[in-house]
Amino acid sequence: MSKLIRTNFDRHEQRRDRRYVSPAITVTIGDECFAVVDWSLGGFQPVGGPQVAIGQEITGAVTIAGNDQSFAFTAEAVHRDGRNGLGFRFVERSQSLINALDRALIVRLMGRRRA
């Protein structure tokens, strides 16, 4: 089992992983594709996502802007936000998905430094 490291130091924030809005990702669940409000290595919040109950698991695929590859996942609905809908926590995600999200963040951050 891997050790959990907290990357968000806001004492009121319960999430373990920092959230990002960029690079943009989309999630495909069933036949529907949803833009994502924000995401982290721990989960995501789709815009108008699927209508499921808290605790229900879904399966789908993540696509990262600028990368035409998709990555399978299983996630659990963990909270409801009145403005943006449901938030999901990854239950199963591949190392390939984690690596792709990490690379996308590095590219975004490095691009910012050059500007």
Image: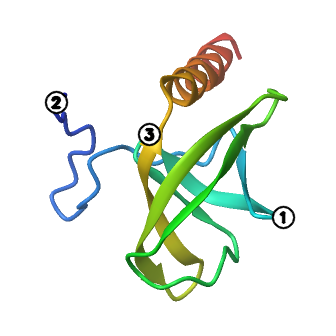
Q: CA distance from mark 1 to mark 2?
A: 34 Å
- The residue at the point 48 percent across, 57 percent down is 75
Which amino acid, mark 3?
Leu
- Return the residue at label 1: 31
Query: Mark 3 or mark 2: which is in front?
Result: 2
Colour scheme shown = rainbow
* Label 1 secondary element: loop
Pointer 1 with pointer 2, Cβ within 8 A: no
Mark 3: give few (<14), some (14-19) or many (20+) Cα within 10 Å: some
Q: CA distance from mark 1 to mark 3?
A: 24 Å
What quarter of the picture does the C terminus occupy? Answer: top right
- Return the residue at label 3: 41
Residue 99 badge: none
- Return the residue at label 2: 1
Pointer 3 with pointer 2, Cβ within 8 A: no
Measured along the vertical axis of the image, is residue 90 above or below residue 70? below
